[in-house]
Amino acid sequence: MLVSALLTSVGINFGLCVLFFTLYSILRKQPSNYDVYIPRLLVEGTSTRRSGFNLERLIPSPGWVRRAWKLSEDELLSSSGLDAVVFMRIITFCLKIFLVAGIIGVFILLPVNCTGDQLEGVDFVDFSNNSLDVFTISNVDSGSKRLWIHFSAVYVVTVFVCYLLYYEYKYISSKRIAYFLSSKPQPHQFTILVRSIPVSAGNSISDSIDNFFREYHPSTYLSHLVVRRTNKLRNLIHDAKKYYKRIIRLQSNPTQHRYGCNNCFGLFGRNVDLVDHYEKKLEDIEENVRLEQSDVSLAGEEIPAAFVSFKSRYGAAIAFHLQQSINPTHWVTEQAPEPHDVYWPFFSSSFMRRWISKLVVIVACILLTILFLIPVVVVQGLTNLSQLEGWFPFLESILTITFVSEVITGYLPSLILMLFLKTVPPVMELLSSIQGYVSHSAIERSACIKVLWFTIWNIFFATVFSGSVLYQVSIFLEPKNIPAKLAVLVPAQASFFIAYVVTSGWTSASSELFRLVPLVWGLITKPCTRSTDDELEVPTIPYHRDIPRLLFFGLLGITYFFQAPLILPFLLVYFCLGYIIYRNQFINVYAPKYETAGKFWPTVHNSMIFSLVLMHAIAVGIFTLKKLSLASTLIFPLAILTLLFNEYCRKRFLPIFTAYPAETLIKKDRADENDAALAEFLDNLVTAYQDPAFTPIHFSSNDGLHSPLISSAEV
């Protein structure tokens, strides 16, 4: 029955994949759906809109596959940055692992499992009604010498994964250094963020900064820019943009109704010309913006934080790494993000508010984890027909239909779980944004880690243990029993996770190509917005959503390869789809919004090490239950060696992802000494971190409102 349900799930998702690919081939040639795929090309000036019917556009073409396949790593690096290269290296890394593990699992371990007689044999005549347990290690006799084949496979794959981890860590570290050396001077390379600035009586924050750094960093200090509280100003600018878009929408569509009532409900009052009404409101807001800009600049809205710039990268690095004051809570330094990566609302919160926010985020993550167990329990109920009939007796007659029961047990549970998981990444990003990070990239990296461990706990452990919260916690309160519990429960969920890979993996890869949600949203909003090319926003890839998904499938493959190798072909299909699809997305859809220079890779490395250690714990429990105590004993050194390997990599490579070494900084500074453009760059560095809220706005038609009361240079 489990095999039949799995085949149903595979069939449904295969059909969906074919449908998605066919629709995509049509969609990418349709002139009316440019909002889904064309924004980046329009912005880069490499594509133009074409109107009118064109039959050639409706003919599916595999040309995009060829272009995605031919894309080199250097081309990807130049167009999408090092983060995109790291993302694709994750996919190729998993492909290498599961190609080797798949050969071992499918051609060696799977026949060993099937020929065992611990469980009932395989009925090839009625193949669809077999249990997947006959394909797992559960079917191998206890005490059988065949289990040494599984033991050897665990050692071989562990060594191979560790070798690849070392190679990738070394390669990406070298690419990070090379990327830095080949880059042009960037503001964040010369700048640090200084917080908790003490102010003496009679001095302003700006004076205190200038006096401190001229005294203790006289040869390298260049300039500083004090951060100001601008939350009210940002709200005004947001309102101005809102009214400006309304005016543009009304003016671009002459047939649209331009008259309405001038009250909040639109039911009472006299009719007015909406364009004139919105223009007057826009002029009032612009005037308030100019007044607020001058008030913030002159009325002492400074906060004890500033971006301090230096004449060299090495000078900025020294100021960043050294403790600046005897009191470690004063003059706290950290690396400055890129100017467009700064998360400005961070500065509008007080220290106490940020501290409380961190506690709130911890509590919210715990509550979200507990609440998410509800759909997990529902999903597990769907996989058990007898339990489902007990919950809903009136469905008993419907559940006797073979196709309905197969869809409910094989496809529906994974689909429900996947839909609930869609809400997790944006929620985690929201929680990370109030946690006190100074940049959007740091928020996304934090959200990536949260989503990853949330997925591992709620999808893997919660599904495996399938009990109440107290039961799951009680298991981890007895560490000695964890391997034995995992050995019994993990193989039993093999069919569910295979169906999950098919449902969540294959479908998500196809939907990523099709971009169904942006398409539907564009079709709904396009008649209302009437957006122009200048208003199209190029999307950026949500790393905090996609990287955890890749790593979770990597965990499933590593933990299940020796006990249920049937999962490996499905994972290989997923990563092969991802390899082509994401390369196409980087070419035609996504554009980098910021650059972390590969800082996501340490998270990838740690996740893979966790997957290996988890596999070792499961192996210890399985070999113990199978009465092969020597094998379970010999697994312990493998886990210890894996942790020692991780510690070596942490000491060897992680510092490169934290900060650049002095050797690299000095070499780059010396290479720029003869650059004539460096002097101009340092002059512009003074205003590089100017808050965008102080930028003059140019929305209304009144030219007198185009300039602020005070120039940005004076702020």
Image (cartoon, helix red, strand yellow):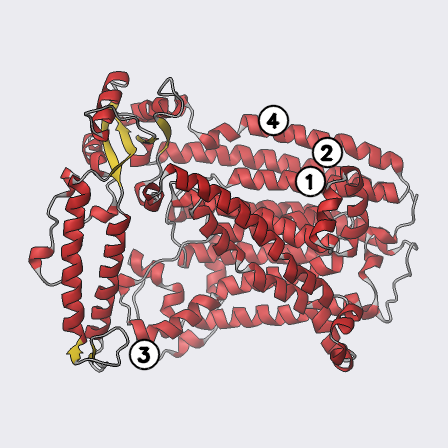
Q: CA distance from mark 3 to mark 4?
A: 61 Å
Q: Residue at x 69, y 52 (%)?
A: 469
Q: Which mark is residue 612?
A: 1
Q: Position of residue 515 (x, y in %)?
A: 47, 65
Quadrant into which the C terminus falls: top left
Q: Could you tell which of marks 3 and 2 lies nearer the N-terminus? A: 3
| Residue tagged 3 | 52
- Can residue 468 be seen here? yes
Residue kind at label 1, given as amino acid type: Leu
Q: Could you tell which of marks 1 and 3 lies nearer the N-terminus? A: 3
Decide which of 348, 335 is in the foreground and name it. 348
Mark 2 is surrounded, within 10 Å at the Cα level, by few (under 14), some (14 to 19) or many (20 or more) other residues, namely: some
Q: Which mark is residue 449?
A: none
Decide which of 448, 31 is in the foreground and name it. 448
Q: Which mark is residue 639?
A: 2
Q: Could you tell which of marks 3 and 4 lies nearer the N-terminus? A: 3
